[in-house]
Amino acid sequence: MATHFSPCSSSSSSSSSLTFSSEFTVCKPRRYCFSKWVSQVHPRIHARNHFRIKSSNGHPPNAVSMQDGMDGTPLAEGIKPEEQEIFFDLSDSEKVQSTLSITVVGASGDLAKKKIFPALFALYYEDCLPENFMVFGYARTKLTDEELRNVISGTLTCRIDKRANCEDKMEQFLKRCFYHSGQYDSEEHFAELDSKLKEKEAGKLSNRLFYLSIPPNIFVDVVRCVSYKASAVNGWTRVIVEKPFGRDSESSAELTRCLKQYLTEDQIFRIDHYLGKELVENLSVLRFSNLVFEPLWSRNYIRNVQLIFSEDFGTEGRGGYFDNYGIIRDIMQNHLLQILALFAMETPVSLEAEDIRNEKVKVLRSMRPLQLEDVIVGQYKGHNKGGKIYPGYSDDSTVPNDSLTPTFAAAALFINNARWDGVPFLMKAGKALHTRRAEIRVQFRHVPGNLYKRNFGTDLDKATNELVLRVQPDEAIYLKINNKVPGLGMRLDRSDLNLLYRARYPKEIPDAYERLLLDAIAGERRLFIRSDELDAAWSLFTPLLRELEEKKIFPELYPYGSRGPVGAHYLAAKYNVRWGDLSGEDL
Ligand SMILES: NC(=O)C1=CN([C@@H]2O[C@H](COP(=O)(O)OP(=O)(O)OC[C@H]3O[C@@H](n4cnc5c(N)ncnc54)[C@H](OP(=O)(O)O)[C@@H]3O)[C@@H](O)[C@H]2O)C=CC1
Ligand SMILES: O=C1O[C@H](COP(=O)(O)O)[C@@H](O)[C@H](O)[C@H]1O
C-alpha cells in the first residue's frame, strides 16, 4: 500500500509550531474583521474603522462578550445589549489595518476551480470579505497572474442578483487574484511566495489562510514549508486541510502528529464540506428550537434513522484516488458519520464550537465499532441502457481490473447510550446509482393502540410518521403524516407537511464552501473536525475496513444507474427497517 502521506520527522524541529504566529500570540483583546454589512448595521464601528467578519454562528467566534466583563468594561454606549458581544477594543499594536490573504495550494486542481475560487468570489460579491484581502494560487503548473485569472473567471457566476453590477465585481475580484508557481516541498519556493505576500501586505497586520487543495501525500510537506517560510509575522496563520485525513486510525494519527509538529490544533481546520450544507446546519435548529421535535428525539419515539447518499455518476476521472479509499472512507466515515453525530448528540451547553464538538465526540465514543455482518459492500458494473454504454468501475484505466474497492456500502450502526440504545442508524452510500441525493430520514414508531389501525390495512409501517431532511438536491424538510381524505367516509391518506426551500426562500442557497471559508477566516471552528473527533470516527471504521481488506470481501455487483445491491435490503430487513428512499412515496 502506498504511504498515505510523506512521513515527518519524529522530533520537533527548532521551527516548531512556535514559528507560526499563533492566534494566542496576537494581542488581546482580539480584533475581528467586520463585513461591510455589519459595519452598515453598526455605523459607529465603521467610523472607528473596525473590520470584522461575522461567522456562520451569527457572531464573531470566540467573541468575548463585554457583558461577560472580560475586563470589566461597561456596555458600549448606544449599542443594544444583544449586540454587545461583537464589539472589541483594539489594542494599540492592532491599530493598523489588517490584511487577509487566502492561498489556495493546488490552485490548478479540480476542487480549486470547481469550489474554492467560486466560493471566494461569492463571499466577495456578498461583501463578506474584509477590505484588504487577496487570493493567491499556488501549484507546480506554470501560470501567470493573468492566466490564473482567466481560469478563475471561467468558473465565476453571479448567482444572487442578476441586475447587480456583476461584471464589475468580477473584475475587481480578479484584480486581487495572484499566482505563484512552486514545488510543494520547496522551502525556497514558499519563501518566494512569502515575499510576494509581504509586498501586497505592505506592512499591515497580516492574517494568512492556506487552503490545502492537494492530494494528502503532500499535506505535511506544504505545512512544513508554510510554517518555516510563509506564516504570518504579526497576524494569525490558519490552514484548511481537505479530506482524506488518513486511511485508518494509524495513518490518521500519524498525519495529525505530523501536522502538529508545525501547527497548533487551533490552526488546523479539517474541512468536511457536508457540515457546511444548509440542511445539515438546520438540523440542530430544527431539533433544538422546535418543541415538537426535541421530546421525540430518542429511542422512545424513533424507530430508526437513515443517512443516505447517492450519486448518479461513477468515479469518472477520480478512479486513481478513489481506488485507494472506497466509498466507506470517502463518504461514510466522514460526511455521514458527522451528520449522525450532529443528529444524535445531547443538547450542547452552548453553540460555541467546543461545546458542540464535545457532544459530537461523546456520541462517537458511545458507538459500537462496525461489525462485518452489519455491512454490505457493492461495486458498479457496466450497463447498457437505451443504447448508451455506462462503464463499470473497473473499466476505468486508473483502476485495477480485479479491484475489490466498494463503490457502494450500507451499514447498520448503534449508539450504546441511554437515548439511542437499540435504535439502528442505517447508512447507505453509493456511486453510479439511479439518482443523486443526500438525505436524513427519521422513521418514528407505530402509534400504540392506534384507533385507526384497521384503516391502514395490514402494513402498519406505511402509517408511521417519517421526517425527511433532503440535503440535496432541491433542499426540503417534510414530515409524512396521516390524515383523513375529505368526504363522508373514513379513508386515511399519507400526506406531507412540506418546507420546500425553493418555494419558501427564492434566494439561492450559498454553497457549503462559502460558509466554511467564511468560518475559517473568522476563526469559527464549529463546523470543522477536531482531532479527537477524527480519532473516534476512525476507531469505529478501522477494524471493519481492515477485515474487509484482509478477508478480501467481494463486493456485490450492481448495474450502473440501478438502485444498488439487493444486499442493502436484507441488511435493513434484519433490523426490521425499510429504506425510506425506495418506498416510491417521495416528493
Ligand atoms: N475534487 C473534489 O470534488 C473533491 C476533492 N477533495 C479533496 O481535495 C483535495 C484536492 O482535490 P482535487 O482538486 O480533486 O485534486 P487534484 O488531483 O486536481 O489535485 C490538485 C492539484 O494538486 C497537484 N497534484 C495532483 N497530483 C499530485 C501529485 N501526485 N503530487 C504532487 N502534486 C499533485 C496538481 O497541481 P500541479 O500539478 O499544478 O502542482 C493538481 O492540480 C484532495 O485532497 C481531495 O481528496 C475533497 C472533496 C471533493
Ligand atoms: O467528499 C466528497 O464529496 C463528493 C460529493 O459532494 P457533493 O457536495 O457534490 O454532494 C463526492 O463526489 C466525492 O467522491 C467525495 O470525495
Image (tube, rainbow, N blue to C red):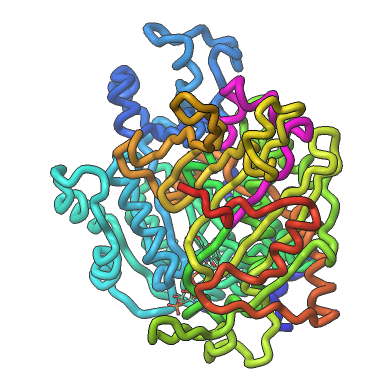
The residue that appears at 58% across and 53% down in the rendered structure is: 583
The residue that appears at 41% across and 68% down in the rendered structure is: 107
Residue 330 coordinates in the image, percent (x, y): 62, 66
Of residues 195 and 453, which is closer to you in this image? 453
Q: Is residue 233 visible?
A: no
The residue that appears at 74% across and 83% down in the rendered structure is: 1
Residue 448, above or below 195: above
Residue 464, above or below 562: above
Of residues 361 and 127, which is closer to you in this image? 361
Residue 159 coordinates in the image, percent (x, y): 26, 49
Residue 326, above or below 452: below
Q: Is residue 196 left or right of residue 558?
A: left
Tell me the magenta residue range. Answer: 282-308
Residue 359 painted magenta: no
What is the quadrant of residue 374 in the picture?
bottom right
Residue 251 coordinates in the image, percent (x, y): 75, 68
Q: Is residue 113 visible?
A: yes
Residue 291 painted magenta: yes
Q: Is residue 315 left or right of residue 35?
A: right
